Amino acid sequence: MAPKESLVLLVDVGPLMHGVLTEIETFCSMLVQKKLIYSKTDEVGIVFFGTEDTNNELEVEVGGYEHVFVQRKIEVVNGHMVEDLQNLPRGTTFGDFMDAIVVGMDMLIKKYGPTNKGKQRLCLITDARHPIKDPDEGTKEDQVDTISSMMKARGVRMDCLIVREKLDGNANKSIVDENDRLLNHFSRRTIAKTIFVGRSASLSGAVRTRNISPVTIYRGDLELSPAMKIKVWVYKKTSQERLPTLKKYSDKAPPTDKFATHEVKVDFEYKSIEDPNKVVPPEQRIKGYRYGPQVVPISLNEWEAVRFKPDKSVKLLGFTDASNIMRHYYMKEVNVFIPEPGNSRAILAVSALARAMKEMNKVAILRCVWRNGQGSVVVGVLSPNISSQENIPDSFYFNVLPFAEDIREFQFPSFSSFPSSLQPTVEQQEAADNLVKMLDLKPSGGEEALLPDFTPNPVLMRFYHVLELKSRNPDADVPPVDRCLKRILEPDSELLSQNKPTIDKFGSQFELKENPKKKKSSKRHWRDRLLTSNDDGETAKDDMSEIRNSNVTNDSSAVKVDKIGNSTPVQDFNAMMARRDSPEWISRAFREMKNYINDILENSYEGDTFLKAVDCLEALRRGCILEQEPKEFNQFLFDLYEKWKNTDLVSFFELVSSKNITLISKTEAEDSDIMDDEAKIFLPKSKPPPQ
C-alpha cells in the first residue's frame, strides 16, 4: 500500500539546541505516535545534524556534508522510531541546516525517484543561529534557488521550525538575519512554511502532526436573491479533535494465527415481555416515543412521511449590525465559505460583498441546508474575512446561531444589588486591576503565551504518550506529567515570580477566612422548610438570611411543585421559587401567589383568611427581595390597597401594618424607587410607586 506521506525529520542537535531538546523529543515522538495510530502506512526518515559523527551517503559519494547523521533511512513508521526520537543525542558541534536539507532531499530522490510526487515532506527543526557554509559555486541564494527548483519539480513540501526563545549577547544578529532570509526565500520559491517559535511550550503545536484532507460540506450557490447567486465551497475551519475510538478486541484467536483480525461482533436480541423465551424478529419491532405515561408507536413509513426533507440550499435572509450577534451565541464549530476555485466572477463577488460588510460593520444571516434530505435547517451568521495576502482571496466565516429552544435564560441578581459593605474599596479595586494587568499572557514587546494555534491539547498528548508506553509494556505504570505538558497545564512560574509583589498586595487587601463545610442537616433544614408548615414564628429576616447563605439546588430527590395549593400556599410558593429547571418558575410563582391572595381576600368571611393572606404577603415580599424585583411587590401592594380600601376589608391592612409589612425600600433592593423613610409610611395615598 502506497504511503499517504513520506516525511524526513531534520533535527538540529548542536550545542545551542540542548536547552530545548527535551521539548523537541516530545514533539517528534508525538508526531510518529500519531502516525502509528492514524497513518500506519506512512514512511519516516530521521536525520540529525550538529553531531560529532557523520553518516550519510552524500559524504561518501561527493564529500562534504559533515556532521549530518542519518539515524534511520526512510521506512514505514514503527515503535523503534519513537524510541530514537525520545532519546536525541546531544551534539558537540554546529551543524549546517542547508547540508541537512540537501541530505534529506537526496534520501527522498533515491527512495522514490519520480514517483510519489506531492506526498513527500521535509521537517527542519533548528534555531538557525550558526552560519552555513558558502557553496562551491554561486551565492547562498543561488543554492536555495537550486534546491527549491528540485523540490518544486518533485512536489516536496517543507516545514521550517525555528526554535528561538531569546537572543543572548553571544548571538551574531547578522548571521541570524541572513539565515532567516534564506529560509524565508524557500517559502517564496516552493511549497514551504517557516514558523518561528519563541516559547518552547508552543513547540508541540507549531506543526500539524496529523494531516487531515480537506473535504467540502457544501458546494453550490450562495443565494442572495432568486436572480443573484454566487458559487461557493464550504469547509470546516475548526473541528474538535477527540480521542481515538476504542475498539473491542478478542484474544480467542490462537497466538500463531498471523491473519487473525481479533474482531468482535456484537448482536442484540429483543424478547417479548409476555414470553421471555421468544425472540421478536425485526419486522415485528417498531419504535415509539414517550408521550406522558404512554408510548406512541411510529412506524418507519410514518416517520418518513412526516420527516422534514428540505432541498439543498444556502440562502441569505438579511443583514444586521455585527454588534447584534454576541460571541456566546455561537453554537457549533466554525465553517469557512470560499469562492469556487478558479471562478473569477465568484472571487470578485465574494470579495466585494465581504469588503462592503466589513466597511459597514455588518454580518449576514443565512439559512443553510448542506445536503438534500438533511432533516434539519441551520441558521447562522456569516462574518467577512478579509485576506492579508495577495494570492489568497477574501472569504467568510460561518457560525451556527441558536433557536429559541436552544437559549438558556438564567436569572441571577446583579452584584450592584449587594450592600456597600460587600462592594470593593478603591484600594481593593486598584489591587485587582494591577493583578490583571501584570499577569497578562502577552507582555509588552514579547510573544503571547498559549496561542491557540500553537497550544496542543494536553489530554491528547498525554493519551498518545501512555498508549505508546503500553504498546511496549502492557504492565507499564502511568508516567508523571512531563515538563512540556506542565507548561500548558500549570501557571508560568517565571511569570508568577516576576509579579510576586503584585500578587502579595492583592492578597493583603482581602481578608481570607476558612469556609467551614456545612453539615448535611443544615442543607436539609431549608429543603424541609419548603415542604412543611411555616407557622413557627420565624421572622422574614431569618428566612432571608438562610436563603442567601444556603446553597440549595433543585435536585431529583426534591418534590417539584408546579402550582400553589390551598393547604400549604407559602410552602408551595417557596418550592416554586427554588426550582431552576426553567426561568418561567419565578414569574409564575409571583403571578400565582398574587392571584391566590386576591382570591382568599375576596372569599373572606369576617376576616377568617386574613392571617393566611398576611403569611402569603410576607412570602411574596421575601421572594421579590431575593429575586431583586421590588416593583413587582410594591405595585401589587398598592393595587391591593386601592381595591379594598373602601370596603369591609380595610381592617386587613391594619393587620398588615401591625406585622410591619412595608413597601420594599432601596436599601433592601437596588432597583426600588422607594426610600427608607417612605417605605415606613404604609402605602402612598395619592399615587402608585414610581415605575
Image (cartoon, rainbow, N blue to C red):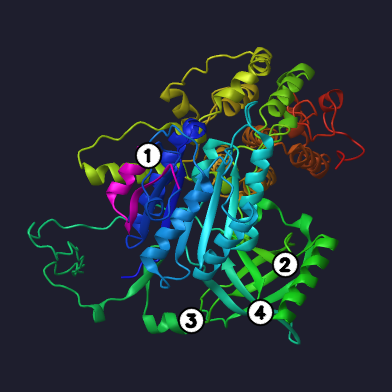
Span colored in magenta: 65-88
Q: Which residue is mark 2?
A: 394
Q: Which residue is mark 3?
A: 306
Q: Nearer the viewer, residue 361 or 281?
A: 361
Q: Residue at x 78, y 68 (%)?
A: 319
Q: Which mark is residue 53?
A: 1
Q: CA distance from mark 3 to mark 4?
A: 41 Å
Q: CA distance from mark 4 to mark 1?
A: 51 Å
Q: CA distance from mark 1 to mark 2?
A: 50 Å
Q: Give the mark nearest the N terminus, 3 or 4.
A: 3
Amino acid found under the numbered disc labelled 3: Val
Q: Residue at x 65, y 43 (%)?
A: 411
Q: Residue furthest right?
A: 686
4 vs 2, front mark = 4
Amino acid found under the numbered disc labelled 4: Gly
Q: Secondary structure at mark 4?
A: loop
Q: Residue at x 60, y 27 (%)?
A: 548
Q: Say if 23 sits above or below 270 in the image.
A: above
Q: Which residue is mark 4?
A: 342
4 vs 1, front mark = 1
- Which picture quadrant has residue 503? top right
Q: Nearer the viewer, residue 454 or 520?
A: 454
3 vs 4, front mark = 4
Q: Nearer the viewer, residue 567 or 249?
A: 249
Q: Say if 526 sits above or below 362 in the image.
A: above
Q: Give the mark nearest the N terminus, 4 or 2.
A: 4
Instruction: Give the total number of marks visible in the rendering.
Output: 4
